[in-house]
């Protein structure tokens, strides 16, 4: 595990840093060219002739020629750093190309970032949260607790970049690419001293948090997701387990999941630095003031957030629950008489099962209506599993679209329907999401008002777009709900 003094940033010029890197191939004219390079980029379309472009080649099935044509040939970069040789690089002319030696890509990027975006050893105290579900909520709860204790906090995750609780930018990633993350940390150095961030399995697998030792860390839970990228469940778990490599000496990885704790100890031995948290029950008065904590998994997120904040602060804060607010798109409720409409980001089989189970427990007298869809160009195996999860706990289901990307929305729906043969009533299929939300409200109005209903609109949560055919067109479940509430004359109570 890394210690506080591990991997110190080497001093010296850019030329000296490049000389210290392990390259399998380097240009002969390096010494005369480095003086002209003034910035480092990870996106080709942001390059100038003074940029060093760091381009990582993945095994995605595309030929080198396609990547060179699409990303490199017309880019204005001054030098290219790539993780392995590419066929056809002679098309780039005389621009210098550095090819890192096997296994040295992440260290090379760190040394370059140490030059362009230097960080001192005491600049940041860092907490990281991984897990299939609950990362965003845990990070935002932890942020709120730290702010109440007087800390200046930068948070990074699915909801973007926030400084002291105020949104400042979208990143487009759960965990930004390494160069972008270093750019962010350099830019906000001095404006905050504590970083709380979501760390995705992609980020751990791709080294996006390389060399950033964690002062506190948590793993929320684990269930099937992202198999389109990782290939199988074991690889997905192994990627997440790499968070252990980032822990400072003596820092435990906190989890409320017995499964996660047991699997990590089975994999790394009984001495693995894993701390299992018991989740206490909360008093009725607390649940009355913070109804979102009625959900079992939100209490788990809260327990983890409180434990992370305690490690960072060095003392347990008093009544930290008072600082919590609902997280955007996470059990976002609108209530009209006997109708409760919930907007939530749940978009995996486990997340849907968890929230529907929590709704059944929290609203035992209510009937449950669920609207959801499955994303395109993602793991198709989870589509029927999501459908089955909804059928188990919903009295009525509206199946719609959710970011079809480059797939046919109807084909995605057909995949999902294969898991929905056990639904209590046949699913209502409405591919257009706006029309589906309208249909949800129409169904609620068709039932006697004395009959309690909870309507879950799942999958989009905080997102304000639908991604289809390469275009993200504006769309918001929140706006659609507000429009239909107004249409029916239902005001929030």
Image: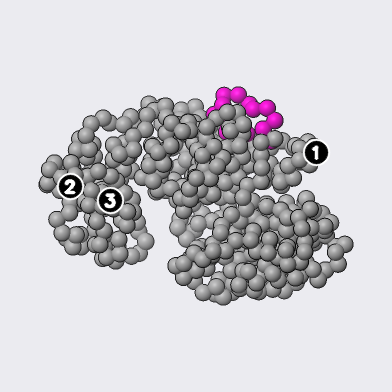
Mark 2, Cα crowd under 10 Å, few <14 / some 14-19 / many 20+, is some
Residue at image point 52% right, 50% down? 158
Mark pair 1, 3: CA separation: 56 Å
Q: Main secondary structure of the magenta part?
A: helix
Is residue 161 left or right of 425 when viewed as pictured? left
User: Can you tell which mark lies on residue 23?
Assistant: none
Q: Choose the circle earlier in sequence order: 1 or 3.
A: 3
**Magenta span covers which residues?**
305-321
Q: Inspect this view and state whether residue 259 appears.
A: no
Mark found first going from the N terminus, 3 or 2: 2
- The residue singled out by tag 2 in the image is 26
Give me the residue at 38% from left, 40% from top: 182
For image coordinates 29% across by 46% down, the residue present is: 40
Q: Is residue 358 above or below residue 153?
A: below
Mark 3 → mark 2, Cα distance in angstroms:
14 Å
- Please report the residue visible at 60 percent of the width from the left and 66 percent of the height from the top: 373
Question: Quadrant location of residue 289?
Answer: top right
Q: Which structural element holds mark 2?
A: loop
Seen in the picture, residue 441 relative to 41 is either above or below; the reply is below
- Count of numbered circles in the view: 3
Name the N-terminal-most of marks 2 and 1.
2
Residue density around tag 1, few if under 14, some if 14–19, many if 20 or more, within 10 Å: few
Regarding mark 1 in the picture, which secondary structure is present there? helix
Picture quarter containing residue 248? top left
Q: What's the CA distance linking mark 2 and mark 1?
A: 66 Å
Instruction: Name the mark on residue 53.
Output: 3
Q: Position of residue 217 (x, y in %)?
A: 52, 36
Mark number displayed over residue 284: 1
- For the question of whether residue 320 can be seen, the reply is yes
- Per the image, label 3 sits on a secondary structure element best described as strand
What x and y, as percent, mark residue 191?
46, 33
| Quarter of the rendering occupied by the N terminus | top left
């Amino acid at each position: 595990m890394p210690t506080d003094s591990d991997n110190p940033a080497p001093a010296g010029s850019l030329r000296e840093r490049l000389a210290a890197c392990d390259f399998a191939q380097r240009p002969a004219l390096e010494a005369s060219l480095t003086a002209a390079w003034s910035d480092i980029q990870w996106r080709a379309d942001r390059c100038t002739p003074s940029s060093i472009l760091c381009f990582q080649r993945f095994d995605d099935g595309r030929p080198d020629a396609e990547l060179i044509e699409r990303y490199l040939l017309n880019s204005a970069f001054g030098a290219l750093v790539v993780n392995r040789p590419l066929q056809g690089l002679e098309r780039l002319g005389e621009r210098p190309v550095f090819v890192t030696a096997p296994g040295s890509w992440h260290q090379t990027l760190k040394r370059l970032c140490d030059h362009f975006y230097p960080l001192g050893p005491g600049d940041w105290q860092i907490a990281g949260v991984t897990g299939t579900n609950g990362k965003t909520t845990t990070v935002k709860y932890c942020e709120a607790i730290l702010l109440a204790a007087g800390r200046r906090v930068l948070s990074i995750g699915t909801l973007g970049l926030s400084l002291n609780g105020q949104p400042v930018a979208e990143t487009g990633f759960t965990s930004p690419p390494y160069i972008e993350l270093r750019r962010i940390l350099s830019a906000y150095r001095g404006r905050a001293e504590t970083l709380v961030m979501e760390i995705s399995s992609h980020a751990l697998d791709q080294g996006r948090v390389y060399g950033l030792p964690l002062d506190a860390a948590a793993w929320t839970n684990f269930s099937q997701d992202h198999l389109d990228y990782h290939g199988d469940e074991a690889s997905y778990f192994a990627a997440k387990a790499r968070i252990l490599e980032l822990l400072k000496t003596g820092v435990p990885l906190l989890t409320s999941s017995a499964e996660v704790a047991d699997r990590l100890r089975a994999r790394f031995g009984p001495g693995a630095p894993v701390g299992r948290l018991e989740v206490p029950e909360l008093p009725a008065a607390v649940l009355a003031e913070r109804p979102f904590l009625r959900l079992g998994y939100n209490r788990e997120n809260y327990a983890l957030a409180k434990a992370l904040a305690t490690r960072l602060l060095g003392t347990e804060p008093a009544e930290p629950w008072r600082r919590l607010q609902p997280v955007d798109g996470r059990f976002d409720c609108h209530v009209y008489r006997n109708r409760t409409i919930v907007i939530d980001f749940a978009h995996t089989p486990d997340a849907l099962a968890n929230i529907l189970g929590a709704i059944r427990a929290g609203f035992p007298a209510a009937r449950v209506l669920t609207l959801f869809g499955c994303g395109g160009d993602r793991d198709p195996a989870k589509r029927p599993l999501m459908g089955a999860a909804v059928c188990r706990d919903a009295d009525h289901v509206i199946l719609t679209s959710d970011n079809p990307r480059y797939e046919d929305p109807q084909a995605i729906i057909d995949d999902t329907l294969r898991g929905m043969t056990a639904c209590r009533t046949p699913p209502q299929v409405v591919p257009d999401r706006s029309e589906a939300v309208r249909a949800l409200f129409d169904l609620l109005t068709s039932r006697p008002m004395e009959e309690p209903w909870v309507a879950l609109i799942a999958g989009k949560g905080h997102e304000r777009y639908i991604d289809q055919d390469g275009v993200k067109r504006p769309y918001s479940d929140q706006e659609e709900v507000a429009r239909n509430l107004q249409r029916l004359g239902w005001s929030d109570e």
